[in-house]
Structure formats: structure tokens, C-alpha cells
Amino acid sequence: MRIVIPVLTRLLSALCALALMVLGGLTVVEVVSNWTGNGFVVVADDLPTRMRSTTWDAQVVRTSLVVAVAAGLALVLTACWRRPPLTVKSRQAGVEIERRSLERTLGRNLDALDGVSGSRVRADRRRIRATVETSRRLPSEAIAGRVSESLASFCALHELDLTPVVSLRAERAER
């Protein structure tokens, strides 16, 4: 979800902006055309009459309302989706650390540990989640312990109130 929501937000924003630009341009063309006495250019000439004669319980009205409500809900839910913080607060007064820099630094630290072949670190407001890959035949508890210890010491050094959560993926080579 970390990548999906920002991409979805940008896509929906671009679609809404495009729709508003098209509708605005269409409105300007029609208004100018009617002011000059040429009638409607893009819209059918009988559209105002059809709109006045269409009742609220017509299928086209209900379908339009359902589409508008669904689009509005999608926009509101996407806008309200909680995103990860840009910074992580430290116990030191006025000190905040950029979340992405913290994740990259911790990832490099974990990759340097013995027994770790790859790592992925994600930080939020309360936790540091580390997914660690190993192909060594060491016990999983030993590697997870080293990773947890490394994360805890980093948090203590930089006075971060984050709880380390470690998950281990062992890719054991078959011989």
C-alpha cells in the first residue's frame, strides 16, 4: 500500500483535473457560441428541453448519481488514507529525522550484519519493521536477535521511541 496510494492519488487527481478542464473548455465554447447567436456547437440543440423533461426517477439520472457518488467516495477515501510520516520524532528537543533517510541508514546497517543477505526497513510513527533475508545455515533466532539488537541500539543512540519488529525470511540453499 505504500506505493499504491500515492500513485492512485496522483492518477485520480490527474483524471479529475482533466475532466474539469474538458468541462470548463466545453462550457466556454458553448457560452461564447450562444452569445454570438450560433446556438450549440458540441451539445445537441435539444439538450435543454430533454433536461427539463427528464424526471428524477429516470434511469439515466439514477445511473449518473451512482457514478458521481462512487467517484466522490473513491476521491474522499484516497484523500483520507493515512500516509507514513515524513519525519520521525526523537526524544531530543526539536529533533526530527527524515523517515526515508532513517530507513536507508538502517537498511545499510542491517545488510552489513553477518548472516544477512538482504533487508528491507520501514518506519512509521511507532515501529521500525525490518524484513531480513538470509541464506546462511545459522539458527533463525540468532540472526533475528542480532537484527533486533542492532535496531534497538540505533534507536537508543538516536533517542527514538520506536519499537523494532523483525521478520526473517530464510532462503536455504538445497544441496
Image (tube, grey):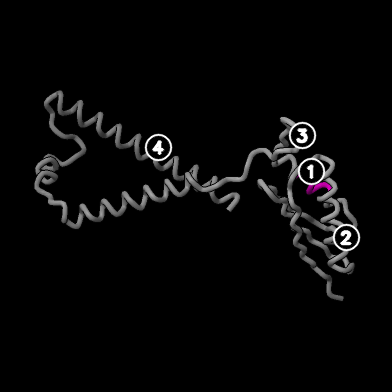
77 lies left or right of 87: left
Gap between marks 2 and 1, in whole Å? Answer: 18 Å
Q: If you read the primary sequence from the N terminus, does the residue marked by circle 3 or circle 2 appear first?
A: 3
Q: Which label was assigned to residue 105?
A: 1
- Residue ID for mark 4: 17
Residue at position x 76%, y 65% from top?
Answer: 169
- Residue ID for mark 3: 92
Q: Which label was assigned to residue 115?
A: 2
Q: If you read the primary sequence from the N terminus, does the residue marked by circle 2 or circle 1 appear first?
A: 1
Give how far across and how far down residue 40 sits, in percent.
16, 34
Query: Residue 18 falls in which quadrant of the image?
Result: top left
29 lies left or right of 120: left
> Mark 4: which secondary structure?
helix
Gap between marks 4 and 3, in whole Å? Answer: 43 Å
Residue at position x 21%, y 38% from top?
Answer: 42
73 or 61, nearer to the observer: 73
The answer to whether marks 4 and 3 mark residues whose Cβ atoms lie closer than 8 Å is no
